[in-house]
Image (cartoon, rainbow, N blue to C red):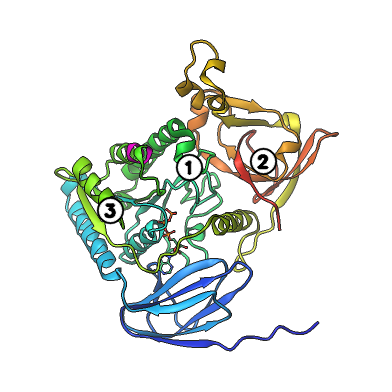
Amino acid sequence: MSMAQTPEPKEWILDEENELRIEIDFDTKVKLRLVTGTAEIFGTELGQNVDYEFSGRKIAIFTWHGCKLLVTGTCSVEYFAAETPMVSYLNMHLALEQRRVLASQGNNNGQGPRVLIVGPNDVGKTSLSKMLLSYGLRQSRQPIYVDLDCSEGSITMPGCLTATPLTEMIDVEEGFGSSATSAPTAGSAVMPLAYYYGFPSPKDNTKLYNVLLARLAKSVKRRLDEDEAAKKSGIVIDTNGLIDATGYEIIANCIKEFAVDVIIVLGHERLFSDMTRLHQKPGVSVVKLAKSGGVVERDSSFRRLTQNQKIREYFYGTAKSELAPYSTMINYHDVEILRVGEGSLAPSSALPIGEDRKVSETHVVKVEPGEHLLHSVLAVSNADKMQEPEILETNLAGFIYVSEVHEARKKLTVLSPCPGRIPKKFWWLGSLKWAED
Ligand SMILES: Nc1ncnc2c1ncn2[C@@H]1O[C@H](COP(=O)(O)OP(=O)(O)OP(=O)(O)O)[C@@H](O)[C@H]1O
């Protein structure tokens, strides 16, 4: 076996307010080191002479004052840009900071800004959320990150609506995962609130999506009422890129439920004009920000690989903090597997008399365990009893992965990030599958 050669590091010298944009495939690793000066990735500052390692990522390393970087490994794309919208993003942060100062002085009922970021797919909404949250954190704020993008699952897993108070800087290598305690465990100080939706798009079951959105908003409000620092810091809501009629309905719902007072429209003129017309009123600002030229469109295979990487990290951790998942055997009859809205797939005429489609969309259906569960990722509900509609609105305890199905013995082998018996018996089945690599 020949030893893999360590590639020569490549040096980049960036002037102030420039950024280096790199794309790294999933099957390669690239090391990045800040040698002199200052630099940040989506708002989080890099330490000098620390090696950061990336795989399957598209990132920008931005410098306010100039820097020297070393990149070791093969990037699929690598170039620097002098034109970025970063000054406007920083100004946005400063405007939010002003609102926080006002809140600290007792204005606006002591509430910091509730920011909603909207725009089509791939305009940099998640990246901007990270920046605004990181800049807030860098000024000792403790904002709450609300992730309504059920296709991605920045905090936990795809298919969820989540909120998490941020108290630590967002990790440049691992994203939100590490700073938001990606595995929700009961009693943890910064436990993310996660509700299970189970579909990749809000269009798949809009009624359920709106029910969960309202539920999440209620929980976030309670958290803000209990936590003075978070209340003054405010919230940043990241959405998915739906901007058709359903998208508008969800945006309106979100503004109402979270009492949004700053709407940021990213990279879309017509959406900005519509949002101004529909939602601008005293106390609510609608702001337009430009999309960065660096934002990369991600095709479905890249998104799928990102999803796989997320699931893998949930159970096995990352290179920096490896986890060993626990494998447990479960009897079919010890768990109840549930899914939502099965009825919505049936034609209206096939629905029970007196039940309209809207009701069936949030109806909970029991699923028989069997071979079909193999490789599924299931969400473990915190609920102790099967009661509708409460069970739908119950927070999640975590996730498990079905690694084997023993049909003849009526047992499942499941992986879990925590040791011991899985404490809860109601498990949600969605469309998430994962083939361990
Ligand atoms: N300035 C930049 N340079 C290089 N890559 C970038 C830059 N900004 C964002 N990206 C990358 O582009 C991709 C899309 O960005 P992002 O996830 O922020 O968009 P989004 O609007 O939230 O997308 P979606 O709505 O589809 O989830 C990501 O992989 C992100 O890391």
* Label 1 within 8 A of ligand 1 by Cβ: no
- Residue 307: quarter of image: bottom right
Gap in angstroms between the C-alphas marked 2 and 3 = 41 Å
Is 369 on the left-hand or right-hand side of 21? Answer: right
Q: Which residues are magenta?
A: 246-250
Gap in angstroms between the C-alphas marked 2 and 1 = 29 Å
Gap in angstroms between the C-alphas marked 1 and 3 = 21 Å
280 falls in the magenta region: no
Most extreme residue toward the right is 408
Where disc 2 sits, the SS reads loop
* Label 2 within 8 A of ligand 1 by Cβ: no
List the residue tagged with mark 3.
264
Where disc 3 sits, the SS reads strand
* Label 3 within 8 A of ligand 1 by Cβ: no
Which amino acid is tagged 3? Ile
**From the image, which quarter does the N terminus lie in?**
bottom right
Residue at (58%, 69%) from the top-left corner?
25
Residue at (59%, 68%) from the top-left corner?
320
Q: Marks 1 and 3: which is nearer the front? A: 1
**19 above or below 126?**
below
Camera sees residue 362: no
Label 2 vs 1, first from the N-terminus: 1
Prevailing secondary structure class for the magenta stretch in the rendered image: helix
Whether pointer 2 and pointer 1 mark residues with C-beta atoms closer than 8 Å, the reply is: no
Q: Marks 2 and 1: which is nearer the front? A: 1
Q: Residues within 10 Å of mark 1 (few under 14, many from 20)?
A: some
Most extreme residue toward the left is 282
List the residue tagged with mark 2.
422
List the residue tagged with mark 1.
201
Which amino acid is tagged 1? Ser
